[in-house]
Image (cartoon, rainbow, N blue to C red):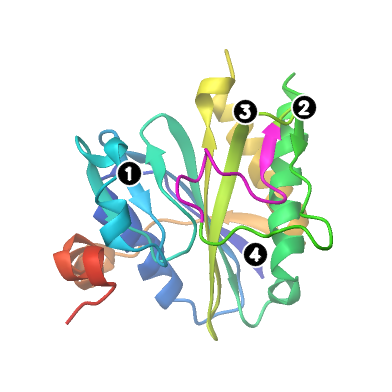
Amino acid sequence: MSLIIYPYIAESGPENMASDYYLFQQTIQNEPVFRHYGWQQEEITFGYGQKWSWVSEQEEIKSKKITRRPTGGGIVSHGHDWTYMFILPQGHNSFTIPALDLYERIHSSIGAVLLNLGHETSLKPCPQAGEKKAGIPGNCFLEPVGRDLMSKNGIKKLAGAAMKRTKKGILVQGTIELSGFLNLDLNEFGDSFINEIKNLVCEDAKETDWPTSFTTERVPYVEQFSSISWKEKRKYP
């Protein structure tokens, strides 16, 4: 088995979400999948569980295109971030990693890479016993949760992720806010992060091209994530 790496592409919000979900739905083997992708323009995504009635009233979405993710979490701004997707299929040993442990290991990996590149970070502690736990975040980077990657002093959130777990596997959609890092070599960062993910899943990396049928087979998912019914009601005919 290998960690399958798909090529970088920069697309719209619905297309990016469709590609992630297409790969997740195609997960029939036991090999984990990773991809890093970009955005054609500044856009916003918001979490599967968020209410559109609340999201639609937020000032930051008024002038930007917005897409509901298939994963949880809160509002996230894209276009000046480093976005990635990670799939752990049900048949792979890493599928058994508890959700919070997986979240911590991913962000610890990002922190280790950044430290090697000269940037110190920290992990936000989880709430102590008896402390009130937050519900669904509103704005992801303004409302950090336990095991988010933070600045060294713990004030600014630098990286977060959202997950979806089904019988097929675990879908992780994550983002790293680049504004906090001056002169960061993104190619070196990306290569080093993939090495960390390789260690997490205990597999060698295998780069692969998109299937020849990818564009055609992805069409229904693009239509889903572009639809008003999905954005407002999490439904698609």
Identify the residue at horizontal 19%, vertical 35% (top origin): 63
The alpha-carbon separation of the residues under discs 3 and 2 comes to 13 Å
Identify the residue at horizontal 25%, vertical 72% (top origin): 233
Nearest-to-viewer mark from 1 and 2: 1
The alpha-carbon separation of the residues under discs 4 and 1 comes to 32 Å
The alpha-carbon separation of the residues under discs 3 and 1 comes to 26 Å
- Circle 4 — which element? strand
* View extreme (bottom): residue: 167
Tell me if 191 is positioned left or right of 58 in this view.
right
**Is 172 covered by the magenta stretch?**
no
Tell me if 83 is positioned left or right of 110 in this view.
left
Nearest-to-viewer mark from 4 and 1: 1
Instruction: Please tell me which of labels 3 and 1 falls first in the chain.
Output: 1
Type of secondary structure dominating the magenta stretch: loop
**Is 138 covered by the magenta stretch?**
yes
- Circle 1 — which element? strand
Q: Quadrant of the N terminus?
A: bottom right
Residue 97: percent from left, percent from top: 75, 71
Instruction: Please tell me which of labels 4 and 1 falls first in the chain.
Output: 4
Vertical position of residue 81 compared to residue 23: above or below: above
Q: Which residue is mark 3?
A: 188
Nearest-to-viewer mark from 4 and 3: 3
Nearer to the camera, 196 or 13: 13
Tell me if label 3 and label 1 are in contact, CB under 8 Å. no
The alpha-carbon separation of the residues under discs 1 and 2 comes to 28 Å
Q: Which residue is mark 1?
A: 44
Tell me which segment is drawn in magenta: 137-150
Nearest-to-viewer mark from 3 and 1: 1
Q: Which residue is mark 4?
A: 2
What amino acid is at disc 4?
Answer: Ser
Q: Which residue is mark 2?
A: 115
